[in-house]
Amino acid sequence: MTCQETHIPCKVLLVDDEENILRAITRLLMEEDDLELFSASSGAQGLETLAAHPDMALILSDQRMPGMSGAEFLQQARTVAPEAVRMVLTGYADMAATMDAINKGGATRYITKPWDDDMLRRTLLEGVEQYRLVRENRRLTALVERQNAELSEWNGNLKGRVLEQTATIRRQNEELKNRNQQISGSFRHIIVAFSRLIEQHSSRLQEHTGNVTGLSVCVAGDLGLPPDQIETLRTAALLHEIGVIGIAPEILDKRVTAMTREELGIFLQHAVRGQTAVDEVEELREAGVLIRHHHEQFGGGGFPDGLCGLDIPLGSRIIAFADYVDRELEEERGEAAVRKVLEKAAKELGHQLDPALFPLMEPHILALYLPARSQHDEGAEKELRPKQLMSGMLVTRNLYTGAGLLLLAKGTFLDTHNIATVVRHYSIDPPSGGIHVSWRAAEPGTRFDSESAESLQSRQFSEEKPNTRHSTMELRPRQLIEGMHIARNLYSGTGLLLLTEGTLLDAGKIVSVARYYEIDPPSGGVFVRGNEG
């Protein structure tokens, strides 16, 4: 039997003025290894022993002793060793003395003389076990309370740590998300920059990548393609002509039907060269596949691999359709030209073009190439290339040669003669941008006074904040406001297309415009329409 989990012997005190009784009881308990026995011949001696050993487990005291009765001794012992189990041994049937020992001394049992050895031994061992259980219960209770307190503190700390870690993770995720968005945005801007370099490589490519990209993304949206596939298609459309870099501009400036056999062989390499150019960038490899196959024909016979039908990637088929339309409208504009190209495209369905894409393409083609009908009034200004000019158009801004010579005054109606003059000057002394014209002639009798570039600029560049919502305005970069729409293509001073008509301005684009005006300033202001929302 053990007194504690540490196996420390339990202490037992025997108090009796008769030495033979002490020896007899001691002999009964001698074989119990887990008991440490103490004896005293009087109450006073017993109190001294308790003072030295207050952790006594059991006290057995005789009731009738000289000097101090058992009841009096147990009463004082209760103070010194309150946890000890107390028992009284009496040889007299004195009920009053027994009750006194129980009530005052806290005795739990009384044993009469003479006793039965087995009964006495069992009673004493039960008392020791009772003490052990009480102490163990108290120890366990204290342990549970301490552990509960530690657990409560740990839970509180854990909750705090969890909340702190959660906040940290959320903050890091937000930072990571912002960084990924910045990287993604930078990546997209780089792609756009590449597309502009491609456009600069040949005059026939001006606006081409932008138009093809716009049509392709619109159709992809109508088809319900996932955002990642639309983004891949957008990238491929922006870079679909990257393979032409390195091909002589005089070849690129020709229509395919006008190329010699040798020139056509060189030109047909650009789809494969385009894929090769972007293949080193893992993020562009899917777009590279679309670039490779954008000159395949739906009925077969295209290049470079002669694929046909649904074997051609969907993105390539979309780009091919948009590319075909924009090239056909390269030198012509107007509703008649657009209708003519749509009729021509319809004849190519199943041969060169995917028939399933025609009903999706048509409305977007009309919206893109007939902006005077689809976006604003017919008299809105447009910036065109020389080959896009038509007789009867009205010049809406003075046109100067690259050397500063006034070539056409504002208010001039175009005819075959002055169109030819413009084309010739764009070959020998090209202006910095396009020709600003109105799609519809002015009413008869309208008079236009020519203005110098300086007076026109001073009049149109108002320092006041624009407050018009629908009219076309020419503004300085710092006057631009988010939500405005570009009303005319904006070209840099060296002729690079910066923003296309219809572009919605946001903070990023306004910052970009301001930067363009510092490094390669356009010849005039930015033509915009107010927020129509």
Image (cartoon, helix red, strand yellow):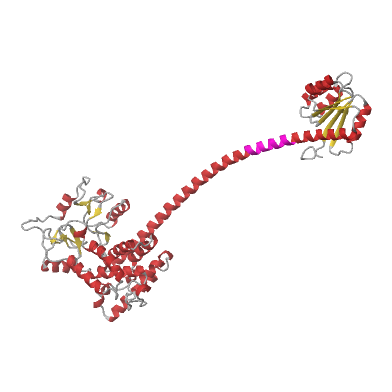
Q: Where residue 470 sits in the image (x, y, percent)?
A: 20, 50
Q: Quick check: 384 above or below 478?
A: below
What is the residue that sits farthest to the bottom in this orientation? 261
Looking at the picture, tell me which residue is in the foreground, 493 or 391.
Answer: 391
| 47 with respect to 439 (left or right) | right
Looking at the picture, tell me which residue is in the foreground, 448 or 354.
Answer: 354
On-image quarter of the N terminus: top right
What is the residue that sits farthest to the left in this orientation? 445
340 inside magenta stretch:
no
| 376 with respect to 55 (left or right) | left
Residue under the point 13% across and 60% down: 440
Q: Where residue 517 sits in the image (x, y, percent)?
A: 27, 54
| Residue range (magenta) | 136-149
Q: Where residue 132 sits in the image (x, y, percent)?
A: 77, 35
Q: Quick check: 31 above or below 413?
A: above
| 443 with respect to 63 (left or right) | left
Regarding residue 441, the answer to whether it shows in the image is yes
Question: Can you tell which quarter of the image residue 244 is in?
Answer: bottom left
Question: Can you tell which quarter of the image residue 444 is in?
Answer: bottom left
What is the residue that sits farthest to the right in this orientation? 20
| 472 with respect to 247 (left or right) | left
140 inside magenta stretch:
yes
Q: Quick check: 127 above or below 42?
A: below
Q: Where residue 129 sits in the image (x, y, percent)?
A: 79, 36
Residue under the point 78% across and 22% down: 103
Number of marks in the rendered image: 0
Question: Can you tell which quarter of the image residue 402 is in?
Answer: bottom left
Regarding residue 208, the answer to whether it shows in the image is no
User: Would you say the magenta stretch is mainly helix, strand or loop?
Assistant: helix
Looking at the picture, tell me which residue is in the foreground, 75 or 109.
Answer: 109
